[in-house]
Amino acid sequence: MRTRRNRRRLCAAVVAAGVVVSGCQAHPGDAPTVDDRQLGERDGGENPSPHDAATAEAARTVTVGVDSFAGNLNPHLIGGVSPVTAEVASLTLPSAFIPRQATGAGGPQPVTAAGEEAGDVDRVLNRDLLTSATVTAGDAAAPTAVRYEITPQAQWSDGTPITGSDFQYLRDMMVSSPGVADPSGYERIDSVEVSGGGRTVDVTFRGPYAGWHSLFRDLLPSHIYRSEAKDFQTMMDGAVAASGGPFQVHSVDAGRGVIELTRNDRYWGSTPAATDKLALTTVPSAATGAQMLRTGQIQMYLTRPGQTTGRTLAQVPGVRTGEVDRRVMLGLFFNQGSPLVADRDRRAALASVLDPALIAQITTGREDVTVPSRPEVPSGDPAAATAEPGAQGAPARPLRIAAATDDTSAVIAARTVVDELTTAGVDATVVTVDPADLYGSYLPEGEVDAVVAWQTTDDTARDYADHYTCGRSARAVRTPSRPVPGLTAETPTATSTTAPAAPGATSGTARTTTTTTGQGAAPASGTARTTTTTTGTAPAPASASTTTTGARDPRRSPASAVSARAANLTGMCDPGIDAAVDRVRSGAAPLDSVREELDARVSAQASVVPFLRDHQVLAVSRQLEGAPGPVDEWPTDPVAGPFVAAGQWRRGPVPARPTDEDDQPEEALRDGFDQH
């Protein structure tokens, strides 16, 4: 009897301890469930068969068909504007401010913001992450200091609290890393101070800043990435270390084209995920997508359309279709740091032999493509396109048009550009390279002459600042993983470590580079009472191999001579553009009052040739539940598209069983259509 009592007491103690521990954790709502016993009873047994168990799991999974994607899920890189990367970030990474949707006569619609962010959707405080964001100095519309208070329940999926260290880490990486997409706002930060056990974050700006609510989107888990000195360019290739959203990344298989997100059980927010799993799967064609919608293998399909995509999908019974315009543009960006295109007139001449509309049609596979009107491409003399470069010492080599290897559309467009240049008598070649090498080495070193890439459209002052201003940060130039194909330049000389030069500084001897591979002095992460990060050049991660250039090459523009590239792909540096943008960002002038001047100055540089704006077709089957009304009225994000509401999607009843001919595995469907 004593033994039994002791066992009872032990069990009671364990249960009580479990209750105490659970009281300290987040309490998400229950995920939808399917009663597997009911599935088994249909076969006359108490337990479900393996087939029924798989059916039950499928019923808890929403599957979305998407276009091909790269495995790097870092949303802060230039490649992060791809649909899938932006979609995953919106579901797994927390942001200080999130898009607000207002209800109008036609349903939920984006609300445009005023002032510095005019042209963007309005963003409101994310109360799941922050209890408040208060202006502590300066004007309310353009403050010089802001205090963020992090909600006590906020935590990463590994149980680590979200703290001010995560704010510091993102700011540090955005002002020091090459290839980042949205750096200009972070360059205006003077310091980030953390107190209150890591829950209070005080941000001080260099001057009045009207666009402060655009900062600290898609925070990253600094306790993992900083402590392990991860290379910012590659650290999220194939994985996200921890989640702070309703979903977490379970697996990434870029080869098979599948990303699986699972419900984040540690998510503390007010709206936990309504389904256990969200799967993104690559669909190679509209015909395949239509068949997968018919058979219930996917519940939604989001794709860049071809000529007949919309009509193909609209034919599927019960499928709703709509269109999504993302605030993203594909274009050609001439590298002002290259001696072959350093001359403005030659850039204009090269642009004049291109047919942007035809390039857009070939890239998309459809004829009804509208070429963006901004920035305007100035007229040039086509005959001058074949003239020898005027820069002294310009290398005798073909014009190199680069594209990131993981961007299919950019590669197609780059090849078409080279075809048109070759037809016009210009010696040109396509170079497809790793994005980290492209933006961290080849562009700033002038080894490629232009790049085809996606970039956000010029709709806000933030966009103009990111794309065209001189920049305030010196970003260390990387040592490339391999030479540019066909490169005949001298091999860099490895010497002792030096810090990156400040803008406008010169040192050393021309053609000499310094390789840095040692341990970086990154600030420690954690919840220290007070930690301050000030501007200057943040140390590079220890795993990153970086290079700092020697004396400025006189053939290169000032911006490209001292720093690796971020969102300013051209290396453009016009003080007039900087001054106009600063007037808007400080709250002194509305964007509309200087937009014409900005567009004229950008056009005069003859450095950007726009091809197309990203346009997608969305098809939704009757199986997808939790999505509001007509597809065209769904809430959307300018970059992530319709996935802002994906946390509430659920999978409904399976359609009528397909015929034996149609009842094929997903891979068989893909293979069958790929053969035609």
Image: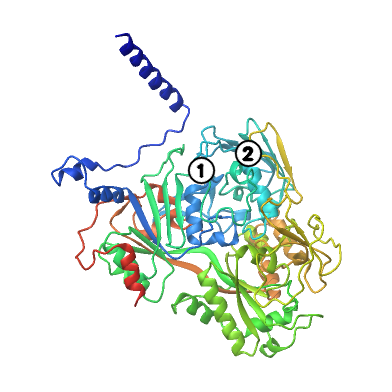
Colouring method of the image:
rainbow
- Picture quarter containing residue 372? bottom right
* Front residue of 253 and 422: 253
Instruction: Where is residue 147? Give x, y as percent.
Output: 65, 38
Q: Mark 1 near mark 2, Cβ–Cβ under 8 Å?
A: no
Q: From the viewer's perspective, is 29 left or right of 164?
A: left
Q: Which residue sits at x=60%, y=50%?
A: 214
Give the x, y percent position of residue 371.
53, 75
Residue 164 numbered tag = 2
Residue 288 shown left or right of residue 81 in the figure? left
Image vertical order of residue 70 relative to residue 243, above or below: below
Residue placed farthest to the left in the image? 44
Counting residues from the start of the chain, the first of labels 1 and 2 encountered is 2
Going 45% across and 52% down the picture, which residue do you hit?
251
Identify which amino acid the numbered label 2 is placed on.
Gly
On the image, the x and y values in percent for residue 54 come to: 28, 50
Tell me the element at label 1: loop
Q: Residue furthest top?
A: 2
Q: Is residue 287 above or below residue 542?
A: below
Classify 354 as above or below 161. below
Q: Badge 2: few (under 14), some or many (20 or more) residues near its Cα, within 10 Å?
A: many
Q: Check residue 53 in the rendering and tell me which mark sits there, or answer none.
A: none
Residue type indicated by callout 1: Gly
- In the image, 72 versus 136, the foreground residue is 72
Q: Which residue is mark 1?
A: 244
Residue drawn at x 51%, y 77% as measured from the top left: 360
Where residue 552 sits: x, y (%)?
82, 67
Distance, label 1 to label 2, CA atoms, is 14 Å
Of 307 and 176, the residue lying toward us: 176
**Along the horizontal axis of the image, is 399 left or right of 624?**
right
Residue 421 versus residue 55: which sits nearer the camera?
A: 55
